[in-house]
Image (spheres, helix red, strand yellow):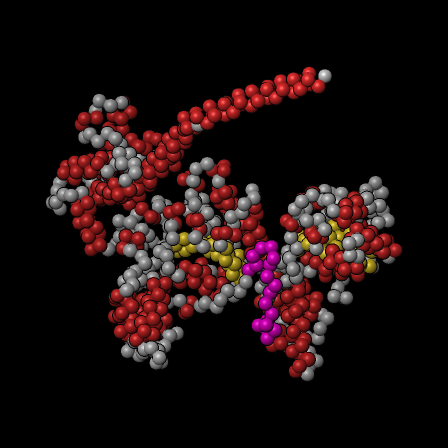
Amino acid sequence: METWSNNMLKSCYGEAGVRLQQFFDLAFDRSGGLSTDLTRMKSLLIVGDSGTGKSASLAIAAKNYQLSILQSSIGDLVQKYPNQLDKGFTQLVKRAQNQQPCLIVLDNIELIFPKSGLIDTHLEMVALKQLQNMNEDAPVIIGVCIDSNVLNDDIKRSSCVLQETIHLEIPTPSERLSIFQGFADQLHLSEDVDIESLSAKLHSYKMADIYMLLRQADELRFMRGTETISEDDILASMKNVNPIGSVIDRTAERPETIKWEDIGGLNDAKRDLKECTLWMQGSYEAYKRLGASPTKGLLLYGPPGTGKTLLAKAIATESSTNFLAVSIPELIKGEVGESEKAVARIFATARRCSPCVVFLDELEAIFGSRDTSGNLGQKVEFHLITQLMMELDLLNGGSDMVLVVAATNHPESIDRAILRPGRLDQHIYVALPTMEERVSILKLLCSKSNVTDDIDLEELARMTERFTGADMQALLRKAGLCALKRQQGLQTVIQHQDFLTAITSLKASVSEEQQLRYSPGSRRCTKVPIYHCRLFSTNKALFARQRKRHYDILQIHHDADQKTIKSQYYKLSKKYHPDLNPHDKEAHERFLEVNDAYAVLGSASKRREYDMENESSSASYSPGIRRTGPAATWNFKPRASRQTGSSSAQAQAEGFRATKSTNYNYNEWYARHYEAEEIRRRARLQRQQQRQNEDAKFEPEDSTLWSRFWRLGVIIAGIIYVTQRVKGLKDEEKVSQ
């Protein structure tokens, strides 16, 4: 680092290096162009994680500006001046004045000015006074800390104390190449070493990591007895050097090695992912030449346990990129605005560690729909959604090699603005494994276990219908447990009978109805909630079984006509209506089942009546939606008996009769029916909460009436006591006189 020039600050530290160079120009007026009316820069705060090169940057600047450095910390002051820290700090400043031009570097300055409490110790007073009253001849004081959040807020806000703050981040790929080149120039590398290709493999490496890597490579060179460092030495050192983890934020890291062939089944999902992530495997320049923008947002949705997380890790492994997994607790902060900052820091880390895959699991947990959250201005989720959309737009408009992969079990709950083109625009359905895919999963699992050769995988696959990949792993564990019980004290081998025994005690984690909540005919999320489309299936036999079940729910014969179906529906829906049974959960379930049955078996005219519901979001959420559809109204009379209603109702009825059409979109009608029912359910819960709140307002007046009388009595007793006490004092005074 002794040979590094001043230009290395810019190439190795980017914008932070430029600002650092400008600070030293202003502090020591090297250009000679500083106005005499301006005060020179005399203090600086450098913030950066461990290993980012805070001390190295100051060493480069001090060498190029011919400065001496006095580096100290509160630990050094305690050791040299016990119980006299203020005196030690004063002596440090005097020593620096005698060695001008000089830098005073205070490591861990947050220990001198901690965040908690006021500035009250004598050391803090002396240090603060020294920082505030620096004259032209005073030395430059530079504070260094890892996290500025633990530094006293008054110190950070005051421009007179620390005049400038510079943040050193994880180096970008170009900055990492400059750092690698700077260290390599001081070593003897062989001519066949490709510095650019090696630097591209050092994902999320900081300056300290690169220094340690080349140091170990030089040690290997010395042990071999050669004069030059070979590329094999550096590659061997990469296996032993782990990048320093971040103290402040999460740092992207190399994922566990999971290749496409390590994932059994999911052939359609893997094919789509390979197409969407082709640009991360070396085709990004080809996209730029074509003037096209690659996909930078993916949504994996499907039943739980199907392998969405494994697919995300396989993307990072196959494309040789970093992997940054984000958990929900990392984004939920107690302070106002900290959650949005956490999202911004995660994407900033991903950009600096590019190429990188950011994995957001259970996306619906905090990025749910804003239309159903209520009190949007006071919801943390609302601000998080806005911040996430901003970050996705920045990725889509920039050239950073960052891919966002989100996973969810409920895609209908995610805010639609996040799923629009340009954000998470590629929606890939991770379905349950088919018969052939279950065979491949079992074959893959058995290849890693001690099993006999007589295992009939096809028979096991037929017996494990609707089993996910996680269920298959549970089956193997259960079979191993059965083998241990059967072969106690012997060499354990899993046999076919162990699998058969394990299957009897296991069942599929995904039910038949849960499987139908997702759209098996499309790999893209539908516009309407997928969760409510649970009765649609391309399997005609399954649909026939569902239809027979709906007749049983309505308690009618399978040959009943539409008039009987409608009459029975009105009777049962009124009987189990939630407004009539507010605390009966079983009645609520029956009410939904009755609506399901009538939605499938209802007349075509009633379906067209539902189809006339306003599709705009504002109208859909208005109270008027309760007047549309039999499931939402208290008026269960036939149409003929409603002719005496309002003119708007008559016009609406006329409109229903006038829109007779054979080209009816059944899927849209059914999905809107369930969406409207869900909105009505939330409205009922909201009204119940409002009634409870109104009752709570009047409750204190009744319940605390006795306590008010009690307080009034205590006050009267206190007045009487004070009066008597004053009277007694006066009597004593008269007696004494």
On the image, the x and y values in percent for residue 616 come to 37, 36
Residue beneath the point at 50% across and 45% down: 384
Q: Nearer the viewer, residue 175 or 559?
A: 559
Q: Is residue 347 above or below residue 314?
A: above
Q: Is residue 461 above or below residue 353?
A: below
Image-based side of 315 in relation to 144, left or right: left
Which quadrant holds the N terminus? bottom right
On the image, the x and y values in percent for residue 90 come to 82, 51
Residue beneath the point at 68% across and 49% down: 114
Q: Which picture quadrant has residue 21?
A: bottom right
Residue beneath the point at 37% across and 74% down: 449
Q: Main secondary structure of the magenta part?
A: loop
In the rendered image, the residue lying farthest to the bottom is 225
Residue beneath the point at 27% across and 28% down: 652
Q: Nearer the viewer, residue 234 or 609?
A: 234
Please state the extent of the stretch shown in magenta in the rendering: 235-252
Q: Nearer the viewer, residue 225 or 136?
A: 136
On the image, the x and y values in percent for residue 546 come to 21, 50
Q: Is residue 197 magenta?
A: no
On the image, the x and y values in percent for residue 310 come to 43, 63
